[in-house]
Amino acid sequence: MIRREHYLSAIRDFQDSDLIKVITGVRRSGKSVLMRQFMEELQQTGKHCLFLDFELWHVSKEFSDTNNLIKYIESQLSDEKLYLFLDEVQNLPDWNVACRALRRLNCSLFVTGSNSKLLSREFTKELSGRYVSFRVRPFVYREVAEYARELGRPATVNDYLIWGGFPAAIEQPNETAKRRYLSDLNNTIIYNDLENRYRIRKTEIFERVVDFLLVSNARVFSANSIATYLKGQGVSISIPTVIKYLGYLKEAYVVQELPLYSPKTKAKLSYYGKLYNEDVSFNSIRKEANRYDLTHNLENIVLNELLYRGYEVTVFNNHGREIDFRAVKGSKIYLIQVAYSVVEDKAYEREFSAFNSLDNSVKKIIITNDELDYSTSTVEHYRLKDFLLMEDF
């Protein structure tokens, strides 16, 4: 397995801190492997480490009580600092209480989880800022290509547009196996995690809503429009229920929502948003006969790449015309339009005219899957494959 230095270097900065290191992200994005790699790195320098995986039945059974866990950890302490890793800690009852207690011991605490409640208001209030969080995502294309080379197999950009970046999907020998693995992962998240956790009774309706949302990535949405569409498909559902179900998907890091940025108010607007999948495979496994949605998946992977690079991203409203992304990191601000192709005149005019009336104080970029360079004097064009292999703009 490749070393994800992008994340390891960030975590390394806090390895001896008394802050709780919270590593979150969607299931099977590589959190556990990352933590084991970091632990092995510490062990090679003689550090005292302990790793407990709460997805393992015997671990969950032995430490079903928070007091048992704390007593066990105390028995492992010495004058030497203990580096403690609790994997999928949300499976531990009262895990937030345990974290608060363990932080006061002579240990450096790392916790991972596939649930955004790790950063919920209750948890953060109890810790009073005594934590630092790291969001781990499925592989970006550079990582996909590196891991594929390690496995001795090809990994094209088009493969990535369809099958995304879950590490275990890359290990599969063919498309049939990829689809089966990703479908099983989807079922684990939707059925085992969400339906069981929230005791959803109307599972058929919930799954219809989920299917609709995950094939509608990179599109404008509102709870009202979703409810209206589903009612037209014979699914009776209220707007509050749509909002609740959408919240469950966000909770599991399956989807993410981008708000609109208004240049007039220079602020985010809450009444409008676009929805994106954490990994484009959530869209592709819902498509049949190879009718994959490459256009919207391309926009989705550009967003995932920007977030991986540390940009704060919103949708930009240019006087009623939507520009896909406003990406900000420090003093850098980019306006980015994404299209599968601008070869046709209509597509070229539509995509480039989105930048009309904007001055040159902010760099304007368009990213497409075209081979030719369509840069102009005011808009810089990036080929998708070049953009995905860059460290940054």
Image (cartoon, rainbow, N blue to C red):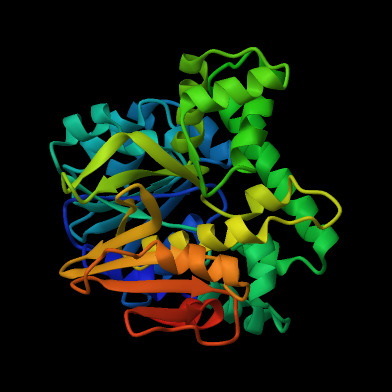
Residue for point 37% across, 58% down: 325
Q: Is residue 232 left or right of residue 50?
A: right
Image quadrant for the N terminus? Answer: bottom right
Residue 208 point in image, percent of width and height? 68, 27
Q: Quadrant of the C terminus?
A: bottom left
Q: Is residue 39 visible?
A: no
From the viewer's perspective, tell me whether residue 320 is left or right of residue 287.
Answer: left
- Name which residue lies at 76% across and 59% down: 178
Is residue 185 at all visible to an observer of this figure? yes
Query: Foreground: 286 or 168?
Result: 286
Q: Is residue 313 left or right of residue 200?
A: left
Above or below for 52 versus 341: above
Q: Please state which of residues 15 and 243 is positioned toward the viewer in this rendering.
A: 243
Residue 217 lies, in percent from the top left, at 56, 46
The residue depicted at 58 percent of the width and 42 percent of the height is 56
Residue appearing at x 49%, y 76% in the figure? 388
